[in-house]
Image: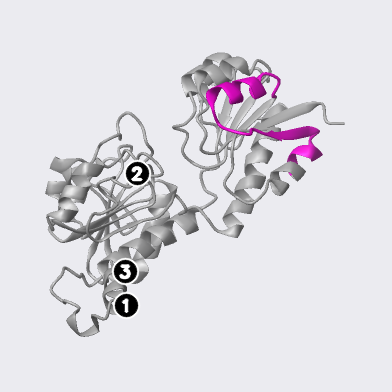
Amino acid sequence: MASRKALITDYVWPNIDVESEVLRTGGVEPVVAPDTSEATLAELASDADIIMFCFAQVTGNVLRAAEKCMVASRYGIGVDNIDIPTATELGIVVTNVPDYCMDEVTDHALGMILALNRRLGQHDAEVKRGGWASVALDQPMHRTRGATLGILGYGRIGRSIADKAVGFGMNIIAYDPLIEPGQSIGDVEIVSFEEVLKRSHFVTVHTPLTPETEGMIGHDELAMMMPGSIIVNCARGGIIEEQALADALNSGHLAGAGLDVVEPAPPPNDHPLVSAKNIIITPHTAFFSQASTVELERRTAQEALRVLNGNPPENLINPDVMGRSRVGI
């Protein structure tokens, strides 16, 4: 009989068979929360050794209720939905899986860029309405070979999309706050944030959501972008000011936008982007394939067990916890 417990706050795949098998080999029994309210999670966390969370908010109150918890392991990359300072204060190790879906996310972002640039959705809809002969060919449409792709956030996913974009013949520039502008990494020129916006035919966003990046692309920043350019966000909702984006699309300044994330999610019917021109919105599925999901389930559970057994995780989010964690690492 398992003597330890893992609280799974939420998941979006068909079942938890993969992670359950991993956890049970370590003597841990998974328990799935029936809902993601703070009260429910706090109650179920009270005797949990592990918290595994996807999109649920793991608040300070939930963490304080989790008096036995050693590790909070994120199903995914971003950790903006857990109170990291409180976790660190309490000695709870926070982990994530930052590289499980690089192919899926970069395929998704490039797919959006290509579909928007070629106006596939718009032309498909017009043909199905009987407008084959009346499809207008006066909208912006860039030749990808020789076009400039600007990448905001040049971490693992940013570098992966750069590798793929080379095959389309694109020129690639990137901005990252941790990399000094003026240098080159391979064929990629590192430039300022403003230069990415001004010089790019296509901009793709791959930054985390932090206080510094929230709302970092608003009216002024969108106005800097090249007329007829396209922006894609497969990172986090809140990085782009959405009313500003809707205005830039509807005015014709931008030729298109692709979003895998919006704020709030799901968007209400009167959300300004739902009716905007030449936009693709997908329901936060850029990460998904069967292979990536299985990898995510397995590695999230493995990280949790690694910490529970007294070992440092492969991916540590809160390094200040080391030396004073509940698990003694």
Upstream in the sequence, badge 2 or badge 3? 3
Residue 121, disc: 3
In this rendered view, identify the residue nearer to me: 30 or 100. Answer: 30
- Secondary structure, mark 1, is helix
Distance from the alpha carbon under mark 3 to that under mark 1: 11 Å
Type of amino acid at the residue the image marks with label 2? Pro
Which residues, given as a range, are shown in magenta?
Answer: 22-48
Tell me if residue 39 is in the magenta stretch: yes
Relative vertical location of residue 86 with respect to residue 253 in this rendering, above or below: above
Looking at the rendered image, the quarter that the C terminus falls into is top right
Disc 2: which residue: 268
Secondary structure of residue under mark 3: helix
Q: Residue at x 60, y 58 (%)?
A: 291
Does 259 sit left or right of 105 as displayed? left
Residue 244 locus on image (x, y percent): 19, 43
Q: Left of 87 or right of it: where is 111?
A: left
Residue 296, horizontal then vertical, whole percent:
60, 47
Residue sitting at the far right? 1
If the image is split into quadrants, where does the N terminus sit?
top right
CA gap, disc 2 and disc 3: 22 Å
Instruction: Report the residue at 50% width, 30% height from top.
Output: 57
Quick one: label 2, few (<14), some, or many (20+) residues within 10 Å?
Answer: few
Mark 2 to mark 1: distance in Å?
27 Å
Report which residue position mark 1 lands on: 128
